[in-house]
Image (cartoon, grey):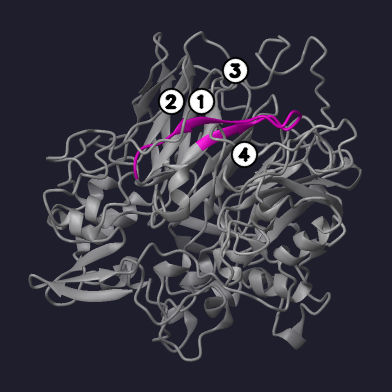
């Protein structure tokens, strides 16, 4: 964080607000587990082997069992029962252009950029929009999303021509939002302070209203293009929307505030990254890097703040300093000022870090924070198949270096037609432990068991959940390399998680997941007996990121590299599929694995990351090992949020923070749009804007086939 004065205005730059990259030596890092797991295998070849990174399958028993055979009439590949390869498009090359690039035979449309009017008075987008007007417009920095068919009955079945597109808005870039920030030398996280040291109140309101979730009614036209429908379904959920707390934490002393002395409610959701879709057709928004929005000058800090990176600094955008005050802003200062927690906002940060359930088909419903799923930096949540009479199971990653992967198993069984979100309020939260031999265990985070008791400062189950990270470490969970999006293969139940990177876990330089993991990897596992509620599993590595110069390991054929009985050779990543920093992840009905990349804005197109170009989306066939680049995005962005319509003939993806690589010096001059003017191409008045991209195949076929 830095403060400086330029031309008599104070500029505060809190950076991008990511979670602190912490290291916990009490638990075995995944790097060492992986090294032990792979030591017996012939992995390294020649002098390049010490930094080998490749695309590989390591033969899990039952994993990649290809339960959807390619030889029958229902085989995946070209849709409609046609047999053939799962991936049918020609890979696009890497790109540094300020464009969307899709394969030959595909077309796209840009819709719903930040500021699109969707509700209320439908105010047209303009940089002069007020904070209240932003609350009627699509939010900023689009992220995870889902297409809900208009029937409102099933999350993945129904209309492919009309529905509700629901998306998260992770954070904001103030320099792109406010007229008085134009032409001022600002970084992507910087704000301008007033002369009296406060923030402009309406700018703070605008930023709060640009966070959260948008629910947008959309409809397909006859030419494959989509349009916004003015509808009562359209809704904004923002950083100010009233919300309820549910589950074991509801009513706990740890969440009682001046706003909710009974500990039942809070206001808003922040830093929503990936998402989840429940079997009962609701949307789950994840609160990820929320800690940087708060400051606390208490000494000592409570562990539920310190362990999540909250410190004495002012809140990320200094909302607590909005001129004129108001508790909707001052709550971001969590310093103890009253005689008790019900007289101030010392507990406000404890009301964040949860999964938030939203019913997109009921615009009057109150969002609910489901506390049984744990409090941490939720990247998102992915549900296993809902089976009648069995528990509901879902997985979530904590997106920070050396954090954990979790699973929740409901106490009650799933009953189609009657189960609702309350099933998530009772059950067991587990943390994953990855053993050296390729097995794993789910360790329960239950008060009174295995050290989660008064001896370690836990008062009850609510305390365990508010301090999920601490509890997971005590239990012996395995710290991972930034666990992000998860996905479950609908055809065989395999669970995949992206581990985006972790360059800080050693001093050695190199693109290697075991040492200085700059490029990340994807792990997968199969639960024991194919049951997602099992407490044991078998794991292996699905993919290592890296570039074609130093890759070299593996073709996905369900075999161990170097031990193939057929004598075939391992296949390096090539120009058609090299990638770094896997992040977004989704598996479609035919088991195509869609992988999105998020090379950080400070690294894109520079140094060892230059070869990867702009962030992209790739597609993998887990049964054959094919991996191809499907799409590249404009300058400075990350590709995120992927879903298709039920017929798989329309795909929606999001482009977040285009132009984020613009330097302060560039933004302070007439060259401020030299990096990106996507998608409006109107550098006189309109800055780069996050937006949704609709993609279709020109011949009307299944996306990817």
In the rendered structure, find residue 694 and report the number of the disc placed on it.
2
Left/right of residue 633 with respect to residue 274 in the rendered view: left
> Where is residue 445 shown, x and y percent of the image?
76, 67
Residues at marks 1 and 4 touching, judged by CB atoms closer than 8 Å: no
In the rendered structure, find residue 651 and report the number of the disc placed on it.
1
> Where is residue 70 shown, x and y percent of the image?
79, 17
Mark 4: which secondary structure? loop
**Comparing marks 3 and 4, which lies closer to the viewer?**
4
**Comparing marks 1 and 3, which lies closer to the viewer?**
1
Can residue 431 be seen here? no
Mark 1 or mark 2, which is nearer the start of the sequence?
Answer: 1
Q: Gap between marks 1 and 4, in whole Å?
A: 26 Å
In the rendered image, the vertical position of residue 106 relative to residue 452, given as above or below: above
Can residue 98 be seen here? yes
Mark 2: which secondary structure? strand
Q: Residue sitting at 44 percent across and 37 percent down?
A: 654
**Comparing marks 1 and 4, which lies closer to the viewer?**
4
Left/right of residue 595 with respect to residue 115 in the rendered view: right
Which residue corresponds to mark 3?
A: 647
Q: Residue sitting at 66 percent across and 75 percent down?
A: 470
247 or 680: which is nearer to us? 680
Q: Residue sitting at 34 percent across and 42 percent down?
A: 635
Q: Gap between marks 3 and 4, in whole Å?
A: 31 Å
Mark 4 or mark 3, which is nearer the start of the sequence?
Answer: 4
Residues at marks 2 and 4 touching, judged by CB atoms closer than 8 Å: no
> Where is residue 436 shown, x and y percent of the image?
84, 62
Q: Residues within 10 Å of mark 1 (few under 14, many from 20)?
A: many
Magenta highlight range: 617-635
In the rendered structure, find residue 573 and report the number of the disc placed on it.
4
Q: Is residue 127 magenta?
A: no
């Amino acid at each position: 964080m830095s403060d400086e004065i330029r031309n008599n205005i104070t500029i505060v730059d809190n950076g991008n607000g990511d979670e602190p990259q912490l290291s916990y030596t009490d638990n075995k890092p995944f790097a060492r587990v992986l090294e032990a797991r792979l030591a017996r295998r012939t992995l390294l070849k020649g002098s390049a082997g010490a930094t080998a990174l490749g695309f590989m399958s390591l033969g899990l028993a039952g994993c990649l069992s290809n339960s959807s055979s390619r030889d029958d009439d229902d085989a995946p590949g070209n849709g409609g029962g046609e047999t053939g390869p799962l991936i049918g498009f020609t890979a696009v090359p890497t790109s540094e252009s300020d464009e969307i690039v899709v394969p030959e035979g595909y077309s796209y449309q840009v819709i719903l950029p930040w500021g699109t009017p969707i509700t209320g008075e439908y105010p047209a987008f303009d940089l002069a929009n007020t904070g209240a007007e932003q609350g009627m417009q699509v939010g900023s920095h689009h992220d995870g999303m889902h297409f809900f068919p208009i029937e409102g009955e099933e999350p993945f079945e129904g209309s492919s021509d009309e529905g509700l597109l629901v998306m998260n808005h992770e954070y904001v870039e103030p320099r792109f939002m406010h007229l008085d920030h134009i032409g001022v030398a600002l970084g992507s996280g910087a704000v301008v302070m007033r002369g009296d040291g406060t923030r402009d109140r309406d700018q703070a309101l605008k930023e709060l209203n640009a966070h959260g979730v948008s629910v947008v009614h959309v409809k397909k036209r006859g030419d494959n293009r989509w349009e916004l429908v003015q509808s009562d379904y359209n809704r904004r959920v923002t950083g100010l929307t009233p919300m309820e707390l549910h589950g074991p934490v509801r009513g706990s002393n740890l969440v009682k505030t001046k706003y909710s002395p009974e500990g039942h409610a809070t206001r808003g959701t922040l830093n929503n990254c990936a998402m989840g879709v429940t079997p009962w057709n609701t949307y789950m928004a994840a609160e990820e890097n929320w800690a940087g929005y708060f400051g606390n000058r208490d000494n000592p800090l409570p562990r539920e703040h310190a362990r999540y990176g909250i410190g004495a600094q002012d809140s990320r955008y200094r909302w607590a300093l909005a001129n004129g005050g108001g508790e909707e802003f001052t709550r971001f200062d969590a310093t103890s000022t009253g005689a008790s927690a019900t007289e101030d906002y010392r507990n406000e940060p404890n009301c964040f870090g949860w999964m938030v359930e939203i019913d997109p088909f009921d615009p009057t419903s109150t969002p609910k924070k489901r506390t049984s799923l744990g409090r941490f930096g939720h990247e998102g949540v992915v549900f296993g198949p809902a089976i009648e009479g069995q528990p509901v199971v879902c997985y979530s990653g904590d997106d920070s270096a050396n954090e954990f992967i979790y699973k929740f198993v409901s106490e009650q069984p799933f009953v189609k037609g009657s189960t609702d979100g309350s099933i998530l309020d009772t059950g067991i939260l587990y943390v994953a432990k990855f053993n050296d031999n390729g097995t794993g265990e789910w360790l329960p985070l239950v008060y009174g068991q295995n050290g989660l008791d008064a001896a370690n400062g836990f008062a009850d189950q609510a305390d365990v959940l508010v301090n999920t990270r601490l509890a997971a470490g005590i239990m012996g969970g395995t710290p991972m390399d930034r666990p992000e999006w998860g996905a479950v293969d609908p055809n065989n139940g395999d669970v995949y998680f992206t581990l985006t990177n972790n360059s800080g876990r050693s001093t050695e330089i190199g693109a290697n997941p075991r040492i200085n993991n700059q490029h990340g990897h994807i792990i997968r596992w199969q639960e024991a007996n194919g049951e997602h509620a099992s407490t044991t599993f078998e794991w292996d590595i699905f993919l290592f990121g890296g570039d074609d110069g130093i890759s070299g390991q593996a073709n996905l054929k369900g075999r161990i590299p170097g031990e193939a009985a057929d004598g075939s050779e391992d296949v390096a990543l090539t120009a058609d599929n090299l990638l770094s920093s896997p992040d977004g992840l989704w598996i479609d009905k035919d088991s195509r694995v869609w992988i999105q990349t998020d090379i950080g804005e400070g690294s894109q197109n520079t140094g060892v990351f230059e070869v990867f170009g702009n962030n992209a989306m790739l597609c993998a066939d887990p049964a054959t090992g094919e991996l191809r680049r499907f799409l590249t995005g404009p300058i400075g962005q990350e590709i995120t949020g992927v879903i298709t319509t039920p017929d798989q003939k329309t795909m929606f993806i999001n482009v977040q923070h285009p132009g984020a690589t613009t330097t302060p010096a560039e933004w302070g001059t007439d060259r401020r749009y030299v990096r990106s003017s996507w998608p409006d191409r109107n550098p006189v008045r309109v800055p780069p804007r996050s937006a949704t991209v609709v993609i279709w195949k020109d011949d009307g076929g299944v996306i990817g086939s």
